[in-house]
Image: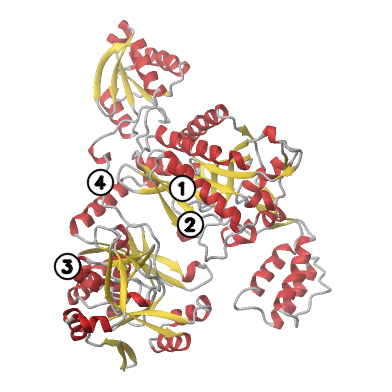
Amino acid sequence: MATFCWGSAVPYWEPLNLKHLRDLLYGSPLPLQEMLPVLQVQLPDGSIVEHPETATALDVAEKIGSRLAKAVVAAKIGDRVVDAMRPLKDITDESPVPLKLLTERDPEALDVLRHSSAHIMARAVMRLYDGVSLAFGPTINNGFYYDFELKQKISEDDFEAIEQEMAKIIAEAEPFEQFLLNREEAVKLCADLKQSLKVEHIETGLADHEELGFYRQGEFVDLCRGPHIPNASKVKAFKLLSVAGAYWKGDAKGKQLQRLYGTSWFNPKDQQKYLDQLTEARRRDHRVLGKKLGLFQINPEVGQGLCLWLPKGARVRVLLEDFLRNELLQRGYDPVFSPHIGRVELYETSGHFPYYRDSQFPPLFVEQAGSLIDAWIDRLQSPEGLTIEAERQLSEAAEVLGAELPNYKPESEVADRVAVLQTWQRAHERYLIKPMNCPHHAQIFKAQPRSYKQLPLRFMEFGSVYRYEQTGELNGMLRVRGLTQDDAHIFCTQDQVEEEFRRTIELTRFVLESVGLSDYRVQLSLRDPKSDKYVGSDENWNKAEAALRRVLEESGLEFSAAEGEAAFYGPKADFMVRDCIGRQWQLGTVQLDYNLPERFKLEYVGSDNGVHRPVMIHRAPFGSLERFVGMLIEHFAGAFPMWLAPEQVRLCPLSEKTNDYALELERKMTAAGLRVTTDVRGAKVQAKIRDAQLELIPYMAVVGPKEAEAGAIALRDRIDGDLGAMPFDAALEKLLEEVRNRTIRQVAKQEEQTELPETAETGGHEY
């Protein structure tokens, strides 16, 4: 119901005026309506309403009430969020259509708003700059971004002009209109618009799509599958936040782009709360606090993404490790250790290599020619391929390095050439810097015969693994290349799965709450049945997903299902934790796996004397110690609770006359298990207290002649201030009691939780 027009080589869509037709339909006598096809729609309350076959979600809303129609942002059919402006019959064949109207009260609506805001921002950028090539513009948590290729470098000084242009677009309140084209038409359209990145994406990334969706808003046209808000006026608040570098499709070998980040909201009040949260987050930045407090360092001379734990930070890490290790030993776990490298074949068996090839460090080869041949294979399989001359040079270089390839024929098919090179690789030792611990633990299980009487077997290891994260994605301790997981793998029978999963959920809750993280929910990450990236049988996947869901339902935990977020080998339960300023972090995880035991042919002898396959559970309450500690630094703003503080007490003598008494108290406190230092500088006591406060030490103890004579100390709380003089033994017991109870105290107004509106956490909708 639209006319396709061309003007100045820029296509646009001009919708036909359907108002008179709709007025006729809704205002006509009954006999005319009975003559037209009818669409049945089921509302959330279960009621069935009938509409003309051409009805949209907005039409359904208008029939209910004009106020509702004005409030509608998008619609939901089953689990799918869709445009409110599209005819329902074009979206689904279901009858009745299960329809939910989304307004700004629904989290999914905010995601649609932000996706549309990304288009508005891209349109503004194209108005202001020449030669803009569009990449992708998805939503992210609390905002959106768009990647651009353009010659002029955008800086924060340009934000005001871009925001003013966005405000003009929003004020025009133009609709977002969808149209569909076949592949040939889509390529021609993007080529006419001089959008080379979109052309490349259609030809390579969307090769299996026969029909492609576009959205038009005014003069702006973009390849997109939606959904979008009805018109731009729904955006009531927005702000550009930052600009960064990016690569086309995340490939460091690809074109370098500029990524512009922004946020948008349904009302300015919610946006201001979020901006206040960002300000507070900057104050808590773990990279700044880590340097200031001497907790960790990432030194380019050591390597980007490789964390050096300084003594104070290492103390926090050791405390966490000891806390969890002791808890696990009491819960029946056995400690194990595994090497930092393993043969590539180990990870080929598990499926991690080459599945995660792009995020792993390149293999290590004993033979000198190994790396050359590995790069040769990579280049052969790339879109660029290799010329005959390049292949000849590579063959000569490989021969010089000792690789004989008599069966290699440059004129043969690429797959055949790759097979010859891989045969050479497999005949020589290849090692991988360990990207994960689970294949090693599977081999530990396999190291000796197992009986059902031994199960469940629970192996634990604080195992260091290494991932090659892109430079632009590294972020202090939160995104690193070397990380230590509090990893454990449980091997059990099918009958034990639910009980073991329940225990791991309880353990994760205990660990999080012990460090004061009590505001969390669980995401049940399931596979996408339409995707082919998952391994294992449908039967095992269905069993695993049903078991996890059943345990979570019985636990009473708040949880939501997320399709497509499962690990490639099994579903998982991810703990999504809110920190004290409302930010959400994915921390502990529990994963159920029927696949790796099958791949490694793990076996145990059952009660029937038959051979059976165990089930494997992966779990890590911290996730990684680097990320967990980085998150805690920001959560506590560097002021760790007493039991986790690297230094718990600072003794401050009034003068040199009481240094000896202070040092004697330090020895007693240390012997009792506290972490204590004494400031014996010749500075005034006020300066010593101020420095201890700045270093965020929980307690200070002032000792002068009076305290020395009475065997007392004047205790000072970093938060509550002066607690007065008290006998040393009483003070010591007070401090030890706080450590034993792992007390978590809120500290100061700026560290209290900021209530934020709920936000959608789904990804973007760009192709």
Residue 616 lies in quadrant: top right
Residue 129 lies in quadrant: bottom left
Binning the other alpha carbons within 10 Å of mark 2 as few (below 14), some (14 to 19) or many (20 upward) gives some
Residue displayed at 51% across by 32% down:
324
**Residue position for label 1:** 574
* Mark carried by residue 565: 2
* Callout 2 amino acid: Glu
Quote the CA–CA distance across marks 3 and 1.
40 Å
**Residue position for label 4:** 755
Query: Where's the C terminus, which quadrant?
Result: bottom left
Quote the CA–CA distance across marks 2 and 1.
10 Å
Give the percent coordinates (x, y) of residue 540. Answer: 60, 53
* Callout 1 amino acid: Asp
Q: Which type of secondary structure does the marked residue at label 3 adopt?
A: loop
Is there a contact, CB below 8 Å, between mark 2 and mark 1? yes
Residue displayed at 18% across by 59% down:
268
* Callout 3 amino acid: Gly
Which label's residue is closer to the chain start, 3 or 2?
3
**Mark 4 or mark 1, which is nearer to you?**
1
Relative vertical location of residue 624 with respect to residue 318 in this rendering, above or below: below
Q: Which type of secondary structure does the marked residue at label 1 adopt?
A: strand
Relative depth, front residue between 410 and 436: 436
Give the percent coordinates (x, y) of residue 44. Answer: 30, 60
Relative depth, front residue between 111 and 325: 111
Taking the image as shown, residue 745 lies to the left or right of residue 607, namely left
Is there a contact, CB below 8 Å, between mark 3 and mark 1? no
